[in-house]
Image (cartoon, rainbow, N blue to C red):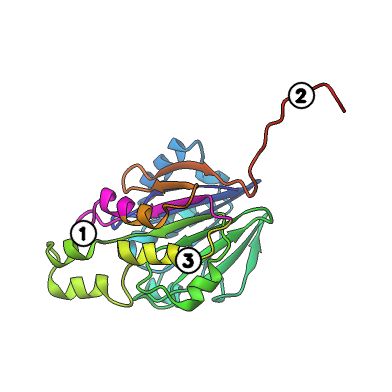
Amino acid sequence: MRYCSLGSGSRGNATLVESGRTRLLVDCGFSLRTTEQRLAALGLSARQLTAILVTHEHSDHVQGVERLARRYGLPVFMTPGTFHGMRNADLAFQPIELDRCFSIGEIEVTPVAVPHDAREPCQFIFDDGDCRLGVLTDTGTITPWIIQRYRQLDALFLEANYDPHMLANGPYPPRLQARVGGALGHLSNQQAAAMLAAVDRSKLRHVTIAHISEKNNRPDLALGELASTLQDWDGQLLLAVQDQGLPWQDISALPTYHFADTGSR
């Protein structure tokens, strides 16, 4: 299994998960043209996608979903609440049920219920039998259920949206500050770090920091907060950004050992 990001932040989000010949696009918050360009930069055409999965109906996650799906005949999976939240979307969709796994090609998908200010939001865990990848963004609170579901992952794509000091002293009006920092908003750097401290990291090889606010956070602050929690960890800490996204990252369920050939059998 491998994953990458076409871009992550308040101006658009799209994450790609691949195993074998199955390629799943999680959200499409960019225009059709931008999505096509960013896929091409990763060596792919939209014709090579298997399906689109939608976490929730906010525009930075669904702006390009309808046009991409129609142009390339792609099935779209989302909760019924998310579909109705898209307001008369001209789109046939495959309904999914929270916390009930289903399979698309070579990947088993588990939609996980999360607290966010949307109609029926979810995030996803992907399992191809060898590796497990969790995507967890747009979540206001880390619940015990999330901790339970996101245990024993090989990789985690995790939101660290804001720094509380920057949010409190930034350009957002009080009402928007309360929304972002509330129980149905987004995860702060500190909440993301607490999530990492709480989960079983024995198999975890990759952590990608995602959905960083351009106005209420800085990459160095997010990296510093999470790195302090991961001091005893020997995996990779990565960063998905708004304009460049994140290149392909391969996930290995087990370490690969290279032995010298001694000539004996």
Which residue is under mark 2?
A: 261
Residue 58: x and y in percent read: 34, 67
Residue drawn at (24%, 74%) of the image: 179
Residue located farthest toward the top when viewing the structure as drawn: 263
- Number of other residues with Cα within 10 Å of mark 2, as a class: few under 14, some 14 to 19, many 20 or more: few
Magenta stretch, residue numbers: 203-224
Q: Residues within 10 Å of mark 3 (few under 14, many from 20)?
A: some
Residue at horizontal 33 percent and vertical 47 percent from the top: 241
Nearest-to-viewer mark from 3 and 1 = 1
Measured as percent of width and height from the top left, residue 211 is found at 34, 57
Which residue is at 31% across, 48% downward? 242
How far apart marks 3 and 2 lie (CA) works out to 57 Å
* Distance CA(mark 1)–CA(mark 2): 54 Å
In the image, 191 versus 19, the foreground residue is 191
* Residue 179 horizontal side relative to residue 35, left or right: left
Q: Which residue is mark 3?
A: 91
For label 1, the residue is 216
Disc 1 residue type?
A: Asn
Tag 3's secondary structure? loop
Q: Nearer the viewer, residue 97 or 130?
A: 130
| In this rendering, the label closer to the viewer, 1 or 2 | 2
Circle 1 SS class: loop
The answer to if 77 sits in the magenta stretch is: no
Q: CA distance from mark 3 to mark 1?
A: 34 Å
Task: Label 2: state its secondary structure.
Answer: loop
* Foreground tag (3 vs 2): 2
Amino acid carrying mark 3 in the image: Leu
The one nearer the camera, 165 or 36, is: 165
| Quarter of the image that includes the C terminus | top right
